[in-house]
């Protein structure tokens, strides 16, 4: 028995909003054996099990009546290497950005656009994390998960994960699969994705004409550090809403009424609207009520100025949703996992 169980534990250090709530029981899992012990423990205490990583995509609306298990397993290994394509496996508790930097140090490209995303490797497949035109599905080859219903291990291939925009089978079947380790196919040859204007612009400002994957990682990290609030300083969970997809006809109609509207046509004919633009146009940028607010630079990010409760943040999100629906007839979907 190695699990260190804490009773009535504060979750404030374990959620990036810094919401001050407690868990009935809390433990950290450093191994598969710890995970199995925690599952038994939850049954013994007649509590549900809530698995977390870095807590950077959570909104906790009150004390959590559960055994909260924080994944802290470590380990990165090369599984295959044919000279160009390299398969790398990382344990769920590895810190995502540290893992990205490790791959770059090995001369491997593929994850550079996903630099500086908070959280863990194990949570990355949950919403198929994405940034600057890349999602993990683009480099994902498989993962090992524990089926919490049967206690059996299951291997998932790319095709079985149902990855979509900020979505996956694991999010759709929330609470069933506990992700233990994830595998990625990376490349020794550099194949960069520089479609997003700000990245090209930052590299040009730095006078870099032929960027390496590490150059792209540094450029993206610098952009992100300037634009996004650091959760250690100002509580937040990154983008609070997904970018909504609307029909081309609705996008055209909205564009007539709002010429500044930002939309990106998708392969399936729909148009992805920049949710941040809608929220800013509706006047919410920098809004604050008590300690719950909208970031002054990035209106897609809700912030906790100090002692906002999860319910206050949720109420603000719902007001924004209702306002955007009323002004633009567009339904905004929340991105963080609300408990
Ligand atoms: P947590 O918040 O701890 O958990 C998220 C969900 O996954 C929960 O439902 C939890 O139960 C579940 N979960 C966690 N670990 C496991 C596991 N091992 N097995 C099964 N279920 C698990 N996201 C992006 O996609 N792109 C971005 O660019 C981005 N930028 C961000 C910037 C900031 C400043 C912040 C605060 C957040 C950002 N995010 C972004 C959101 C967040 O970083 C990601 O969703 C990240 O993958 C969450 O990881 P985590 O370990 O913190 O997960
Ligand atoms: P941005 O560069 O200001 O762009 C605004 C929006 O327009 C983004 O949401 C992005 O969609 C879209 N966009 C921009 N250029 C595009 C292109 N060439 N093709 C298609 N879509 C384009 O966005 P930002 O807020 O600074 O974020 C930069 C990147 O980091 C984005 O990819 C964003 O998703 C990611 N990010 C995510 C989170 C999170 O919590 N989920 C937090 C911070 C940043 P997409 O969002 O679909 O890329």
Image (spheres, rainbow, N blue to C red):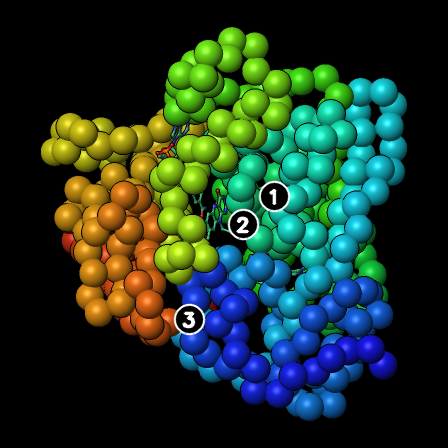
* Label 2 CB less than 8 angstroms from ligand 1: yes
What secondary structure is found at the residue carrying circle 2? loop
Q: In this view, does 114 lie to the left or right of 146?
A: left
The tag earlier along the polypeptide, 2 or 1, is 1
Residue indicated by mark 1: 97
Q: What's the distance in space between the residues labelled 2 and 1, CA to CA?
A: 7 Å
> On the rendered image, what quadrant is the N terminus found in?
bottom right
The tag earlier along the polypeptide, 1 or 3, is 3
Q: Is 30 situated above or below 183?
A: below
The tag earlier along the polypeptide, 3 or 2, is 3
For residue 241, say whether it is visible.
Answer: no
- The image quadrant that residue 62 belongs to is bottom left
User: Which of 214 and 29 lies nearest the eye of the viewer?
Assistant: 214
Task: Please give the name of the residue rendered at 32% of the width and 47% of the height, measured from the top-left corner.
Answer: 300
Residue indicated by mark 2: 118
For residue 277, say whether it is visible.
Answer: yes
Q: What's the distance in space between the residues labelled 3 and 2, CA to CA?
A: 17 Å
Q: Is 272 situated above or below 8?
A: above
Label 1: few (<14), some (14–19) or many (≥20) C-alpha neighbours in 10 Å = many
Q: Position of residue 129 (x, y in %)?
A: 55, 44
Task: Please give the name of the residue rendered at 38% of the width and 53% of the height, measured from the top-left corner.
Answer: 240
- The numbered mark at residue 19 is 3
Q: What's the distance in space between the residues labelled 1 and 3, CA to CA?
A: 23 Å
Q: Where is residue 242 in the image (x, y as percent from the top left)?
A: 39, 47
Label 2: few (<14), some (14–19) or many (≥20) C-alpha neighbours in 10 Å = many
Q: Position of residue 206 (x, y in %)?
A: 45, 17
Q: Is 280 situated above or below 195?
A: below
Q: Is residue 313 left or right of residue 167?
A: left
Q: Is 115 situated above or below 55?
A: above
Q: In this view, does 231 lie to the left or right of 155?
A: left
């Amino acid at each position: 028995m190695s699990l260190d169980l804490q009773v009535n534990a504060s979750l404030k250090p374990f959620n990036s909003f810094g919401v001050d709530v407690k868990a009935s029981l809390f433990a950290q899992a450093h191994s598969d054996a710890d995970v199995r012990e925690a599952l038994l423990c939850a049954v013994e205490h007649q509590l549900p099990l809530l698995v977390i990583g870095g807590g950077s995509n959570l909104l906790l609306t009150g004390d959590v009546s559960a055994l909260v298990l924080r994944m802290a397993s470590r380990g990165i290994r090369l599984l295959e290497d044919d000279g160009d394509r390299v398969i790398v496996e990382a344990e769920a508790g590895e810190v995502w950005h540290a893992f990205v930097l490790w791959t770059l140090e090995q001369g491997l490209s593929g994850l550079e656009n996903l630099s500086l995303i908070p959280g863990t490797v194990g949570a990355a497949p949950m919403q198929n994390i994405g940034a600057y035109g890349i999602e993990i599905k683009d480099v994902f080859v498989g993962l090992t998960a524990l089926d919490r219903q049967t206690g059996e291990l299951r291997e998932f291939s790319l095709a079985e994960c149902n990855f979509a925009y900020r979505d996956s089978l694991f999010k759709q079947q929330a609470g069933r699969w506990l992700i233990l380790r994830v595998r990625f196919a990376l490349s020794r040859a550099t194949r960069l994705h520089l479609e997003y204007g700000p990245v090209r612009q930052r590299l040009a400002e730095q006078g870099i004409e032929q960027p390496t994957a590490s150059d792209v990682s540094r450029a993206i990290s610098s952009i992100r550090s300037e634009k996004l609030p650091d959760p250690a300083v100002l509580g937040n969970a990154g983008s609070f809403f997904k970018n909504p997809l609307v029909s081309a006809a609705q996008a055209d109609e909205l564009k007539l009424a709002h010429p500044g509207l930002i939309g990106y046509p998708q392969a399936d004919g729909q148009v992805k609207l920049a949710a941040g633009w809608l929220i800013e146009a509706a006047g919410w940028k920098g809004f604050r009520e008590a300690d719950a607010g909208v970031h002054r630079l990035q209106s897609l990010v809700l912030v906790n100025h100090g002692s906002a409760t999860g319910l206050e943040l949720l109420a603000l999100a719902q007001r924004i949703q209702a306002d955007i629906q009323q002004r633009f007839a567009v339904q905004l979907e929340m991105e963080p996992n609300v408990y």
